Amino acid sequence: MKRKKFGFKYYLLLIYLLLFNVIIFSNENANSILIIDSDISLFKIGDNISYLNPGYIGLPLQLVDPNNFMPYFFVNSNGIIFRVCYNRSYIVRAIFVGVPKYLMLGDLIQGDLFKTPEGVFLGMTYFELLELIPNIRLNKINNWAYEAILPSGWKIAFVTGIGVVNYPTPGNRISIIYKN
């Protein structure tokens, strides 16, 4: 049986792929977390944030919907921490309140200081939400959470299980507050 030899073009392709990966993963911002002290109102959905040079590869990722993870940076706005998520074109796609539980940054865990214009905050129970907004309507997002859109445009979500999404009970707490 005759073995096929790799030609010169295959070696060039291999070298190109190796060099391309080195260039991609040599981002100076990789594995660093960008924290900006600023007013969160300066960041809106659809804004281009390329002037910040936040990087894209090797950064922490946020699940912004059941199918998409996006990199993010933190904005410290008057002691409240927000995660600003953006796509490959550096367009802001979502803004989350608070720091994820798995990412401990000392004094930065202060998402409970934020309240929407309606008075909703992270950790508020479903019972408290119903007292505040009796006609709130929750929509199921398959494989993720139950979500409601507040009159202010902020969204809240109840993540009630892992892999299973159950309708919140009165004691379940708001897990996520975000805009997208």
Image (cartoon, rainbow, N blue to C red):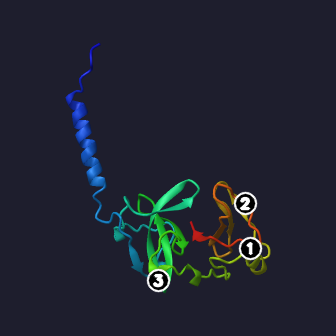
SS label for mark 2: loop
Residue at mark 2 to residue at mark 1: CA–CA distance: 13 Å
Return the x and y of residue 68 as percentages of the image width and height.
52, 55
Label 1 belongs to which residue?
171
Residue 90, given in percent of the width and then of the height, sits at 41, 63
Q: Is residue 158 left or right of residue 99?
A: right
Identify whether 42 is placed above or below 87: below
Quarter holding the N terminus is: top left
Residue 78 lies, with reference to residue 69, above or below; the image says: below
Query: Is 107 rendered above or below residue 28?
Result: below
User: Quick check: 117 left or right of 29?
Assistant: right
Which residue occupies 38% across, 70% down?
A: 33
Q: Is residue 169 or residue 142 the one in the foreground?
A: 169
Distance from disc 3 to disc 1, alpha carbons, whole Å, reads 27 Å
**Which residue is the site of mark 2?**
166
Q: Of helix, strand and loop, which one carries label 3?
A: helix
Q: Which residue is mark 3?
A: 107
Residue 41 visible from this viewpoint: no
Instruction: Using a 10 Å C-alpha cutoff, classify the residue at mark 3 as few (fewer than 14 neighbours), some (14 to 19) or many (20 or more).
Output: few
Q: Amino acid at mark 2?
A: Asn
| Mark 1 crowdedness (10 Å alpha carbons): few <14, some 14-19, many ≥20 | few
Under tag 1, what secondary structure?
A: loop
Is residue 129 in sight in this rendering? yes
Identify which residue is drawn at 27% across, 48% down.
20
Residue type, numbered disc 1: Gly
Could you say which quadrant of the image residue 7 lies in?
top left
Q: Earlier in the sequence, mark 3 or mark 1?
A: 3
